[in-house]
Image (cartoon, helix red, strand yellow):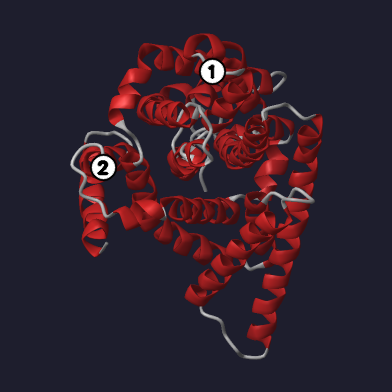
Amino acid sequence: MLTSLAFIFLVGLSMAAICQKLKLPRIIGMLITGIVLGPYVLDLLDPAILSISSELRQMALIIILLKAGLSLNLDDLKKVGRPAIMMSCLPASFEILAFFLFAPYLLGISKIEAAVMGAVLGAVSPAVVIPRMVQLMENKYGTQKGIPQLIMAGASCDDIFVIVLFTTFAGMAQGGHINLIDFANIPISILLGIILGSIAGYMLSVFFETAYAHKHYVRNSMKVIVVLGVSFLLMAIETWTENFISISGLLAVVSMACVLKIKSTAFVSKRLSEKFGKLWIAAEVILFVLVGAAVDIRYTMNAGLAAVAMILIALVFRGIGVFVCLIKTKLSWKERLFCVIAYLPKATVQAAIGSVPLAMGLPCGQLVLSVAVLAILITAPLGAIGMDLTYKKLLVREIESD
């Protein structure tokens, strides 16, 4: 296992660095590493690593959501208002609709399996988008109209919305029928997740403040461990209660991080965010390499042109969804176009949940994973390079400076 971890970290980071030099997302290098090292090509990874990859992927997702929650400024959300709320759900809904309408004909799957696939593919990638939005805010591009804040807020919440839908659709696919009660559980799951996370975040902030007041200073590194432990517990609560009530554990994790940010001093929340950012460096390598390793590249190639066509059709629907969100805003057509480009990349959520239908034993599982990987390989570089090449042309830079 140690040899496998050495390969994952050293080769994964090397390939990521090469891709970065080529102006491609680092994620692509890590995925390629996993595909090459995995059981379907060189078969150099220990089966013990692959057997716990789903748990490792979930841990990685928790880390990036904690970082997103600690980075999210609620004042920015208020500033951009309605479009931010719509961006968190409407583009993904349009994309899922595209899969629901076209995937049964293009890929030969059932309607409910198409909905599962759409939910896997529907999320934008915070790993690709958020770092670029932070850079835009630092360089004052589009900040006058709150464009980076709008995209970052929407991208952070969009993932939660999609994951809740995915859980619902996957449950329907296992049951073999559509149950309206499952849809009623979506707002219940969201609401209870927010409440549970807010309570946990408040209790943690009280604990840290009380310890500080009694001169029992809790180091930031220790806070990270405590926050991670509570996050794992929140995810466990979702599993414990799933038979009688629906609670979104991932939304609880984000809510906890947001409340911690509100209740903590700016310095503390910034330091926690930075530390989770450092954890993410290791977590993303494990996440994306293991996702690559889970992919039978021959099957992915067999998905072929029909899968590529389905992905492109879904992106068109997604772009329409973004434009609908921005109706009656003060954004110019160039700025709206940039928002569409920024909402193209897929990676983090697809990597985390792409193999779940396969693990659940759904007939569409291998196809969903293959299309998810194809979508990452197509959209991550498309969106990342698109943002990097167009932001100076499409966004207005604030020239006022003190």
Residue 6 — which label? none
In which image quadrant can residue 288 be found? top left
- Disc 2 crowd rating (10 Å Cα; few below 14, some 14-19, many 20+) is some
Residue farthest along the bottom direction in this orientation: 215
Residue drawn at 58 percent across, 63 percent down:
232
Residue drawn at 65 percent across, 25 percent down:
93
Q: Nearer the viewer, residue 44 or 258?
A: 44
Amino acid beneath label 2: Pro
**Residue 178 at what x, y percent from top left?**
73, 26
Q: Circle 2 — which element? A: loop
**Residue 272 at what x, y percent from top left?**
52, 65
Residue drawn at 25 percent across, 37 percent down:
40
In which image quadrant can residue 2 be found? bottom left
In the image, residue 39 sits, relative to residue 304, either above or below, namely below
Q: How far apart are marks 1 and 2 (CA)?
A: 27 Å
**Residue 244 at what x, y percent from top left?**
79, 51
Amino acid beneath label 1: Ile
Note whether residue 332 is visible.
no
**Viewport quadrant of the N terminus:** bottom left
Indicate which disc, 1 or 2, sits on the residue closer to the N terminus: 2
Note whether residue 317 is visible.
yes
Residue 39 — which label? 2
In which image quadrant can residue 331 be found? top right
User: Going by the image, does 276 lie left or right of 385?
Assistant: right
In the image, residue 196 sits, relative to residue 134, either above or below, namely below
Q: Nearer the viewer, residue 1 or 101?
A: 1
User: Going by the image, does 233 lie left or right of 81?
Assistant: left
**Residue 313 at what x, y percent from top left?**
50, 13
- Disc 1 crowd rating (10 Å Cα; few below 14, some 14-19, many 20+) is some
Q: Circle 1 — which element? A: loop
Per the image, the residue denoted by label 1 is 109
User: Going by the image, does 251 lie left or right of 268?
Assistant: right
